[in-house]
Image (spheres, rainbow, N blue to C red):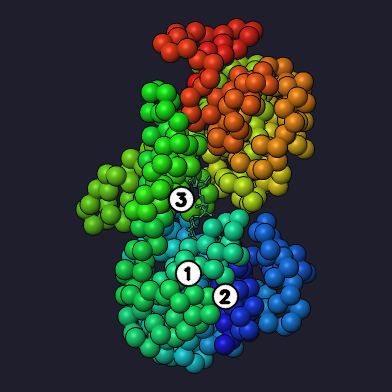
Amino acid sequence: MRIAVVGTGYVGLVSGTCFAELGHDVVCVDKDRAKIALLAGGDIPIHEPGLRELVARNAEAGRLGFTTDLGAAVERAEAVILAVGTPSLPNGEADLTHLEGAVREIASAMNAYKLIMTKSTVPVGTNARLRALLASLTDRPFDIVSVPEFLREGSAVKDTFHPDRIVVGADREEAGAAAAALHRPLTDRIFVTDVRSAEMIKYASNAFLATKISFINEIANICEKVGADVGQVAAGMGLDNRIGSSFLKAGIGYGGSCFPKDTRALIQIAGNVDYEFKLLKSVVDVNRDQRFSVVRKLRRLYGDLAGRTIAVWGLAFKPNTDDVRESPAVDIVAALLDLGAHVRACDPIALPNFRSCHDHERIAWCGDALEAAQGADAVCLLTEWPEFAAVDLGRLRQAMRQPVLIDGRNQFDAERLEGAGFAYSSIGRPALNREEGEAAEPADAQPNRNNIA
Ligand SMILES: NC(=O)C1=CN([C@@H]2O[C@H](COP(=O)(O)OP(=O)(O)OC[C@H]3O[C@@H](n4cnc5c(N)ncnc54)[C@H](O)[C@@H]3O)[C@@H](O)[C@H]2O)C=CC1
Ligand SMILES: O=C(O)[C@H]1O[C@H](OP(=O)(O)OP(=O)(O)OC[C@H]2O[C@@H](n3ccc(=O)[nH]c3=O)[C@H](O)[C@@H]2O)[C@H](O)[C@@H](O)[C@@H]1O
């Protein structure tokens, strides 16, 4: 099939490449000329394991092309995938201007029947509105079906080739069958439903996963107070098939381009029909606060952070990506700077993206974990890159002014760290060196180890 993919972000690029790999003839379109020039030159604009090779192989085979000419791509296509961004408006609602713009451009290129598949995450009712918009602009026949995308950054290629399920929302049976047939080589688990339910499945799925994360983070906060270990609690809970073990990793909360945006949008979707989604509002509040637990631990330890040097390990919102959109690190670094601290930051690949948006005279940009730790009063681990957990503790201790490690992603073993002479604190796990009932006192030159948990 000849396919045009409109929007060459994660979703467009990965799904376009996937369909090329399946033998289809794919052209990816983006209005960002720099992005298309990069792709046409054999480079890729995102860090995604396995993607570069896949793009190169399919481009070389002539099955995958890149263009800024939406009209030409759509004219030759039998199917069009919509994968443009749907970012948050200031009130939390999804901004649909990119989608509407793309549909207007598609209208001008309609020369025959097209199967249009919306992979962008859109509020319930959006596909119906896009259908009405397109119908008002063209007499040519088309279908619009909803095929929400569930890939994760960092494992996008694997997720696309081995999805848990494909959801197809169609209001005409033949259109649903055609979209399902296109995805059939990827999985037999294809759930065909109506368009509105498909749109809602996407938001409900992201909101549910976000809820699991905020839930376990609140359990972690209670664990800290009662002396339980959230890792053990999550493991024990996860053995129940009804609960499942995934998305129960406690830490500094979720970030990224989707959970924050989609939870806000679902709260708005509910609000627009006069329903207050209380649970989801709390999920968002808990998540917003959770990241600052790292800063609170530092303040309990040191009191005033002005003039302190804090090493920040990890800037990406999760490992295996250079994406820093709504990363907890953004707020944590800003809070440290507001409190007068000096920050020494590192990340294996996300540093340039972070630096381009959040540069500051009191941030030193460092090449690796040990360089960042040089002269630091504390290390804060914010992204669970494997190289951080593998750091040589002896060299780390030597590099630091004070051997303090705040582990925002529970990557280290407390006993090992404390055995190596560190004051160590993680999220929701008991601190070995803290006596029950011990009073918290502000510290001066030396950290008050007993206050770190
Ligand atoms: N990033 C992710 O992991 C996932 C994203 N999604 C959803 O997929 C959608 C796309 O997200 P990303 O892939 O992150 O996109 P992105 O926001 O990184 O990129 C979208 C691209 O669309 C292009 N674009 C906008 N209007 C255009 C037009 N009229 N013609 C051609 N190109 C146009 C932009 O220049 C941009 O390069 C969003 O709705 C998102 O919520 C869904 C699942 C996973
Ligand atoms: O709609 C989207 O864009 C995508 O959003 C998420 O994917 P993604 O944001 O790429 O990454 P996740 O692996 O879900 O992680 C999101 C955030 O949650 C955090 N997280 C995840 C799992 C966990 O147990 N604990 C936890 O804090 C991660 O550190 C990260 O900050 C969903 O997992 C995808 O299914 C969905 O397609």
Residue shown at 61%/55% (left/top)? 154
Q: Is residue 232 above or below residue 94?
A: above
Q: Is residue 418 above or below residue 212?
A: above
The amino acid type found where label 1 is placed reads: Lys
Q: Nearer the viewer, residue 88 or 410?
A: 410
- Which is nearer the N-term, disc 2 or disc 1? 2
Q: Is residue 360 visible?
A: no
Residue highlighted by disc 1: 119
Give the image location of residue 289, x and y in percent. 43, 33
The amino acid type found where label 3 is placed reads: Ser
Does dot 1 land on a helix, a strand or a loop? loop
Q: Residues within 10 Å of mark 2 (few under 14, many from 20)?
A: many
Residue shown at 58%/86% (left/top)? 2
Indicate yes or no: mark 1 CB to ligand 1 under 8 Å.
yes
Q: Is residue 66 above or below residue 245?
A: below
Residue highlighted by disc 3: 246
Image quadrant where residue 306 sits: top right
Give the image location of residue 11, x and y in percent. 55, 65
Does dot 2 land on a helix, a strand or a loop? strand
| Relative horizontal placement of residue 68, taking residue 141 as reference (left or right) | right
Residue shown at 76%/78% (left/top)? 60
Indicate yes or no: mark 3 CB to ligand 2 under 8 Å.
yes
Cα distance in 3D space between marks 1 and 3: 24 Å
